[in-house]
Structure formats: C-alpha cells, structure tokens
Amino acid sequence: MNKQQIRKGTVKRLLSYVTKNYKKQFIAVFICIILSSIASVAGSLFLQPLIDNYIVPLLGQENPIFTDLLFAIGMMAIIYVVGIITAYLYNRIMAVIAQGVLKKIRDEMFSKMEKLPIKYFDTNTHGDIMSHYTNDTDTLEQMISQALPQVISSSISIIAILCALIYLSPILTIFVIIFTILTVIVTKTIAGKSSKYFIKQQQSLGKVNGYIEEMMNGQKVIKVFTHEEKSKEEFDKLNEELNNDMYKANKYANILMPIANNLGNLQYVLIAIVGTYFTLSGKLTLTVGTIVSFLQLTRNFTMPINQVMNHLNSIILALAGAGRIFEMMDEEPEKDDGYVTLVNVKRENGELVETTERTGIWAWKHPHHDGTLEYVELKGHIELKNVDFAYEEGKTVLHDISMYAKPGQKIALVGATGAGKTTITNLLNRFYDIEDGKIRYDGININKIKKEDLRRSLGMVLQDVNLFTGTIKENIKYGKENATDEEVIAAAKLANAHDFIERLPKGYDTMLTGNGSQLSQGQRQLISIARVAVNNPPVMILDEATSSIDTRTEKIVQDGMDKLMEGRTVFVIAHRLSTIRNSKAIMVMDHGRIIERGNHDELIAQKGQYYQLYTGAFELE
Amino acid sequence: MIKKLIKSIGEYKKETILTPICVSIEVILEVIIPLLMAKLIDEGVYDGNMNVVYKIGLELILCAILSLVFGMFSGIFASKASSGFAKNLRRNLYYKVQDFSFSNIDKFSTSSLVTRLTTDITNTQRAFQMIIRIAVRTPLMLITSLFFAISISPKLSLIFLVIIPILAIGLYFITTTVHPLMKKVFKTYDNLNNVVEENVSGIRVVKSFVLEEEEKKKFGKVSDSIFKDFSKAEEILAFNSPLMQFSIYVCILAISWFGAKIIVASGMTELTTGELMTMLTYAIQILSSLMMLSMVLVMMTISKSSVERIVEVLDEEPDIKNIKGAINEVKDGSIQFKNVGFSYVKNKKKECLKNININIKSGETIGIIGGTGSGKSSLVNLIPRLYDVTEGELLVGGKNVKKYDIEALRNEVACVLQKNVLFSGTIADNIRWGDENASDEEVERVCKLAQADEFIKQFPNGYNTYIEEGGTNVSGGQKQRLCIARALLKHPKILILDDSTSAVDTKTDSLIQTAFKTEIPNTTKIIIAQRISSIENCDRIIVMDNGRINGVGTHEELLKNNVIYKEVYESQTKGSEDNE
C-alpha cells in the first residue's frame, strides 16, 4: 500500500471530525486567524508612514501639527483592537473545538473498543491498546490545539509579510527570499540530525528504563544473591550509552534556536547594508521609513517559518498517532446475528407465556422462519457436537470435540496447558466462534442466540480476578445493577465472602482500587464468586478459579464454590484434581482432543493419562 | 533539598558554569545588536554615509557571529551538563536503591521506584537544563533590554512602568487559575486510563456480564469531566496571546506617538528615528521575556514534585548496614531463634512474629507450614538478614546475624523467594547468578539436583535458551526449579525454599527432596510449603499460626497432637485415600 495515501485518508478523516461538528466555528477561527495575522503585519508596516509621513516632514517645523499622526495612530489602534479581539476569539473557539474533537475521538474509540471481539484483546498487548488512549491521543491533542492553529496563523503571516515586503521593495525581497532559503536549509539539516539522535536517545532510554524496571522488580532477588555490584556495573554501561545519545540529541536541538535567531540577525544586518548601499548609490530610491519598516518585517519573517517547521514534525507524529487510532476504530466489531432472546415467562395452563414480571423463570424466545414463536425453558442443557476450532487459520486447536452436560451436571476438563480446555469455554460464551460442528444450549444452536442473552445465562469465574474501582458492594452488583442489598449479602454469604467483608472497617462500602490490591488473592476470588452468584446463572464456567490460592484459603473458596454449583450446570477446569473428583464426567484433554472420559472411579480404573496425573507422575502446567 | 541534587552535577561542573556564562554573553550581544542598528540607521542610512554603514555593518556582523558562536556553545554545554547531570542523578539513585534493605524497598514499592528512576529523572533533567539556560536568559534579557531602553530614552521607558505590571498581573492571574485546573485534569486523566486499563484487562468479565453499555457510560462520564475542565483551562489560556498582543500593541502605539513628538520637538537630538525602532525592538524583547519567565515558573513548579520524590529516595537511609569489624565467616548452618519478635512497621501493635524460640541444628531439614499471613515468610526472611528482628536475638552459626558482614552472611544463606524472578538472559546466565565463575559441569550438576537438567536439555538451545524478562517463556514449575538450581550453585550452608515447589508436580518434588538428602546432607534446609507431601519427610516441621509457633515435631507427632496440621492434612488427602 502507498504510505502517502494512508496519510491523505487520515488527514481527511481527522478534518471531518472538525468540519462535521464545528463547521461554522472552524470558518470563524479561520477568518479570525487571518484578521489577527494581518493586524500584526500592519503594525510593522506602520513604521514606514510613521517615519516618512509623520516624523520626517515635521522635522524642523516651528509649530508641528500632529493631528495627522493622531489620526493614523487612531487607525492603527482600531486595527490592533480588531487583532486582539480576533486573537482571543480564535484561541477560545479553537480550544473548544480541540477539546470537543478529542472527546469525540476518545468516546468513539472506547465504545468501539467495547464492541471488539475478544480476539482483538488476545492478539494485541494491553500496552499497545492503552497507548492509543495515552500517547496517540496526546500527540493528537498537541496537534489540534497547538500545531494546527499555529501553522495556519504562521502560514498566513508568511504570506502577509511577503506581500508587504514586495510592496515595500521587490528587489530587497529577493535578498530576503534567498537568505530565508539558506536559513531553512541550515535549520532543516540540524533538525534532521537532531531527530536522528532523538530516535537513538529514545531507544537507549527505553533500554535503560527497561533495565531499571526489570531490576527493580527483581531487587529482592538481587539482595538475596548479593548481586548489587554486578547490577550496578551493567547499569553504568547502559547509563553511559544513554548519556552519549542524549547529549548528541540535545546538542542539536539546543543549537537550533541560537542559529536560527542569529541567522535572522545576520540577515537583518545584510539587508540594512544592501538597502542603504542601493539607496546611496542611487540604484533604488528607498526612504528611511521604508528601510526601517522593511527591516522590522524581515525580522518577523523568519519566526513563522521556523514555527511552521517545528510544528511540521509534531503534525507528522500526530498523524501517525491518528492513523493508529483510526486503525483500531476500523477493526471488525464483534458480530451478532442472534435472534433468540431470553425472556421472563410464567406458566399458564402448562404453557409458557411471556411476561414483563420478574418470575424467576426464564425462557428462550425462538422465532422460527415460518413466523411461529416458540418458548423453550432455560434449563442449562449444553451439548457440543463434533466441534473444530482454530484461533489462526490452519492451526486447529480443537478436533472433533463432542460432549454434553445435562442441567445440573458438573463436567470437568483436565489437561496440560494448551490442551484446549480454556478454548472450549471461550466457545461456549462465543468469545470465539466455532469453525465446524455445533454447540446447542437447551437444544438451540448458540449461533442463533443473541450474544448478550447467551452471556447473561453463563456465569464465569476465572483464575485472574478482575475487580473494578468502586466499593465491594458495587463490585458484587456488577452483573446486576438493580440488585438489592439483601441480594448482595445473600450472594456474599453463598460465596463465603460475607464474613471477611463484615470484618473490614467499612464492610461492603470498602473502596477497591487497583484491581482490589488491598485484598488477598483468596478474598478477591471470593468477591468474584459472589459477583457471579448475584446473577444466578443456570450455567457456570470455572476456569482455574482456585489455582493461585493457598490451601487453607482454598478450602473456604472451594466451599463457597461448591454451594454455588449446586443445581447448576458447571464446566470446571481445575489444576488440583482433588477439586473435581465428584464431577459427573471428567474429560481429559490433550492437544485439542478428548483422550479419556468418564467419572473419577472409571478413569482411575483405566490406569491411563488421568491415573498418571492423579498420582502425580505428570506435571500440570 | 537542592543541595542533594547539586552533588549529581559531579564532573560536569565546568559545563554547568560555562552554560550560563555563554548564555549571558549571547543575551548581551543580542541586546547590543538593536542598539547598533539604531546607529546604522541614524548615522548611516539617514545621513547617507556609506562608510559608516560599512563600519557599523561590520560591527553588527561581528556581533551576530559572536552571538551565534556563544549561542551554539551555550547549547552544547547545556546539553552536556544536563545529560551528564541526569546520568549522575540516575546512577546515584540506582546505587542508593541497591543499598536498600527489604524494608526500604517495601516502603517505596517497586512501581514507585521505577517511576522515580525514569519519569521523575527526565522531568528533573528538563528543569535543570531550563535553569542553566532559559532561567538565566529571560531575566537577563529583561533587565538588560530595560536598562538599554532607559539609557536611550528615560521618558519613553515610562511606558514599561505601566505595561509591565499589567502584563505581569495578567500572566499571574492566568497561570494561577490554569495550573490547579490542569492538575485536576491530569488526575482525571489517571481515572480515564484506569477505566481503560480495567476494561482492557477485564474485557472477559465485561463481556460475560454484558456490561459494555455501562462501561461506556462510566467512560463517558470521565471523558466528559476531562472535556469540561480542559475546556475551562483552555478558555482561560486563550487570554494569553491577546494579553501579550495587547501589551505589545500598546507599547508600539505609545512609543510611536510619544516618540514622534519627542523626535520632532527635539529635532532628532533627544531621540532619533533609529532609536525609535530600537525602542520598539526592546519593547518586544522585554515583554516576551516576561512571558517566557511565567512559562519557566510554571514548568519549575511542575517538576518540583518530581524533584521531591527523587530527594525522598536519596534521603532514605538503608536500615540494614554492616557494623564495624564484621565477621566474614559463618561457622556452620545452625540457627537459633531466641525470643524473636518482628513487625514490618515499627509499631508493636501489628506484630508479625511473636515470641519465636527454636534451635535448628546444622544439616537439619525443617519444614514450615501455615496459612497465608501466619508469618512463615517473615520467619525465614530474618535468617539472611533481609529484615532485622525487632525483638530478641537471632543466631546463625552461633553468632548474632548482625555481627556478620551482610554479603558473607547472604552467601552462606541461599534463599529462594516466594516471588521468584528470572532475569532476561540465557538459562546458564541465570543459574550463574549463584556463582559467576562456575564451570559448565557445575551448572549442570546443580540443575540435575533441582531436577531441571532434563527439561533444559529438551529445549532446542539447551542451557543457552534465552529467558524472556520475568521468565515468561518457561512454565511456573520450570521457573521454580531454575530458581532452586540458582540458589544451589552458591553452595550455601543454609538453604531456604519459600514455597518454591508449589507448581512442581509431586513426583518431581519428592525427587528434589531426595536429592537434597543425598547430595547436600550437611546443608541446613528450611522448606516452606503448602502441600504436606513436600514436607512430611522433614526432620522436624514447624506449624505457624498467627505469628506464633503452634507446634513443632515430626509428621507423625504433629498428626497426633496438632489440630491445624491434622486439619490441613485431611483437607489435602480427603480425595485420594479412598481410591488408592
């Protein structure tokens, strides 16, 4: 693909955010910038008539009359007032536009992210996704609120000044242009060098910071192994490299300004000499006022050029950031063609009738192609039939998986990492869609069920507990916003979490931050179990829910889960085989296939893989 | 506070001093240039004297070139000084952390130390460069320009008396209102990132509870408050450039009006047209310096908190240090706890260990079991003096641990921590942490001991397999075995395993235990475990509960008379008994 084309698209799309919502404001900004730039150029131009018309002619007069000057100054004042007002207006309007656009982009980005399939989160690192909200948005913000108006105003200034210069003296203007081109070349060379070393600096900085992070994380190990001196040595090496690159990068950046400034000064002097020379030698007829005014304008000419060049870099950076943001926004969202929904029903004469009441009985509302409606009671009967699945094309991770769980049955999945246990659970709630075969829920193909209703009917407890910033109560209510306090407490009691929550100084109102880091791993897991309990789902998936908890706490958590599992269909993946012994059926998985199945006693009698795992001959990882 | 930082300038003193000197010369030249310009116009252009034009022109070119040279040097010196300063500061901070004891590290937390060593250093460096360059440049520019302006025309300079306070007050008002708003915005940014972070890592939870819409609302609220606060701040900031323009325009108009009058009235004696132009240049220089100054002040307040955080680390005293005349040799692996009490915070109410008394003979194998928070890890951490006891006495090899040289002690007490860390590098590199000079055979031997040799050899690159940062490319059980091998390579007199075989299967675990018994019989071994099977064959087992020793004895003894031990044992074997 053509890089230039991508950029063009990005610019257009970015501008569309501005023009779509802020068309009038943006036009107003544009006009204001023009007026304000012209006002400032007019100020420099004013020197010429000031000297030539209002000062020189009055020199030596007995009773000089200043009314003309007063009038001219009055005119200038009016122009200036316009300049100041327009400057204020464009700054202010632009601020609103910039923030509005950023808010819109942020909101759109987030709501898009929420719609993306799990696959996106599994294939992109969290750091990369986060950086769209931090780095990329930051550079964009810089560009919209600062670079963009600056570039517009500088460009207009450049044009206005150039016109003024030509008006004052076309010949001298040629000198200015030649010198300006020279300046641009010099500064561009330096800027290029600088950015080259800045990239290097960023790399070494990344290396040093990475090293620091790794060592800080392993600081206790360093102490235990008395490796302090060694770690200092290695650090010094990296630090010295960084120092070198940083010095070079900053050197070029630092000398850029004085060079640009003094080249401006040099140009100023040369124009003065050339101008005077031409005037005195009679080749040109320039008045003092014209020369003074011209000099003042040249001084103002280099500044906007440097500004444009400075900002060009940040604009390119911002466009790259915007490109990445748009890339995320263009990701294919999670599709949902489901039409079977979950509704509350009541029984009337043995028939299921839909109702808006909360009856506690749920049914799948299944509209058929022939226009008839069928209500199937939600029971939690799950069936997988000849399921194949691949995360990446050609790399099948599940082969011909068939199994079923009748309502209320507990099915265990056992096997090494990569055997495909978690993949099966990913398919049940349609985080991923199967390639071949069928999964039926109460007899309905889950592809026909609306995703949100399917997921509401499945409770999940995962090994890595994710709690959200908020009180414990809010976290337990997470799945059911309108749950009453009684329901929350009942759920916590069921999960064995009530006791420890009550013992916290603020009880259920304890604030959790940073993924509940103030609680122990076991306590966090108990809360996540209570969170599922509130929802009262007929089917549950427990994926290694107790594997990172110490044995004494595990007993409490296990009791909580056992209570929760009663009367529900449960798929359980467990590390410690003692926790799945009482399952109705145990599936031993290996490389995406079910290699053994049966209950505990049957499998032990088989003396196969399960037997070996159970007796500790194999390591489960 | 500043004194601590100045030390880090170190060998870059020369550049640090030369920078402001070069900056000063550059500024003075830049102020002289407009003055010469006035002369050029008055005596050259106005009077039509080409010789004067050449003479002054030459002076001007010289000034511009000198200013360019000094400007370049100031830039070069400044970058050398500031990156050197950052280097030293980073090193000093890093070295300081290396001297920290565990309790010092706990106090700051790992992530905050990382921030201090990275972001805060960068901020401080930026502030440093600004101080030696711009913070010198702007006030000097302001003062000299003002000085020359007054020397040209005291009467016209009166305008500055009016306009400088107006601009200063205006800028003060803008920055003081914007700064707190921005602070608030940055806090809200943290909230926003927090919501995103929670959603990214908890996306499975969000999706399985079908709460995308709720999360959007949550996010919308935060992004709304950023929009509001930021817009408010920007609306006030929008006054900045009109205020500046107002000041400049007022100066231009006033100088033009009064200047013209003075010129005409005095007939070019009190003020000339060239000088009028110079006054205008000075006006712009003065006012923009004032504006820069306000920016510098804001930037400095921003970096102030970074500086404070750095100094906090520099000021921290490592609380475990060698005493004078420390002993370098640990006689044997015997350990004696005498009435030991310990608390992480110097606050008796929250004691982690109370009244610990136990004698461990050299070469003994001790198992420790107990629930989370019962004090197992705290107990063993005292042995290599990772923490100091707060009460009582702890003897290793018959002498108080405080009397040993810390390095000597830790070389004899190898500890495999609960939070295992492998470092990026090859497997062999990682194992050699225990002994840099160990031979390949030696490395292989300890790996065999830790039952790691077999799986290492299954990797395509064997011992040269590269371990990713944090050891993410090996399994938990493999990582634990590598960490054990690493500790074994130290040939310690005491070996401590803090829950280090939890991810290893029972069979391998028992192979490790057997290897310990036969291969290193004289090493004192202390093993903390969750699984009874990992410790049941120990010489003695300590049951910890709530910071106290609840019982000591062999497996059989404890089964008979220790309630906790029995309970744990039963919960773990409940399943297997009726089947095997």
Image (spheres, coloured by chain):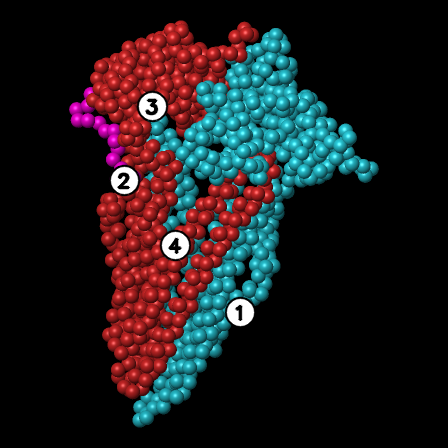
Chain colours: A cyan, B red
Identify the residue position indicated by label 3 in the image.
B378
Res A117 visible? yes
Q: From mark 3 to mark 2, how far is it between C-alphas? A: 27 Å
Q: Amino acid at mark 1?
A: Ile
- Most extreme residue toward the bottom is A62
Q: Position of residue A451 (x, y in %)?
A: 66, 36
Q: From mark 1 to mark 2, how far is it between C-alphas? A: 54 Å
Residue A113 vs residue B113: left or right? right
Identify the residue position indicated by label 1 in the image.
A31
Q: Position of residue A401 (x, y in %)?
A: 67, 22
Residue placed at 37% from the left, 41% from the top? B115
Q: Is residue A331 above or below residue B59?
A: above
Q: Amino acid at mark 3?
A: Ser
Q: Position of residue B157 (x, y in %)?
A: 28, 75
Please tell me in which quadrant of the rendered image residue B139 appears. bottom left
Q: Is residue B30 above or below residue A212?
A: below
| Crowd rating for badge 4 (residues with CA inside 10 Å; few <14, some 14–19, many 20+) | few
Identify the residue position indicated by label 4 in the image.
B180
Residue B326 in the magenta stretch? The answer is: yes
Chain ID of residue with mark 3: B
Q: From mark 4 to mark 3, how far is it between C-alphas? A: 44 Å
Secondary structure, mark 2, is: helix
| Crowd rating for badge 2 (residues with CA inside 10 Å; few <14, some 14–19, many 20+) | some
Residue placed at 36% from the left, 12% from the top? B541
Q: Please name which of the two marks, 3 or 2, marks the residue nearer to the observer.
A: 3
In-front residue for pair B318/A11 = B318
Identify the residue position indicated by label 2 in the image.
B314
Q: Are marks 3 and 1 in contact (CB under 8 Å)?
A: no
Chain ID of residue with mark 4: B
- Is disc 4 in the same subunit as disc 1? no
Q: Pick the quarter of the image with the C terminus of chain B.
A: top right
Instruction: Read off the magenta span.
Output: B313-327
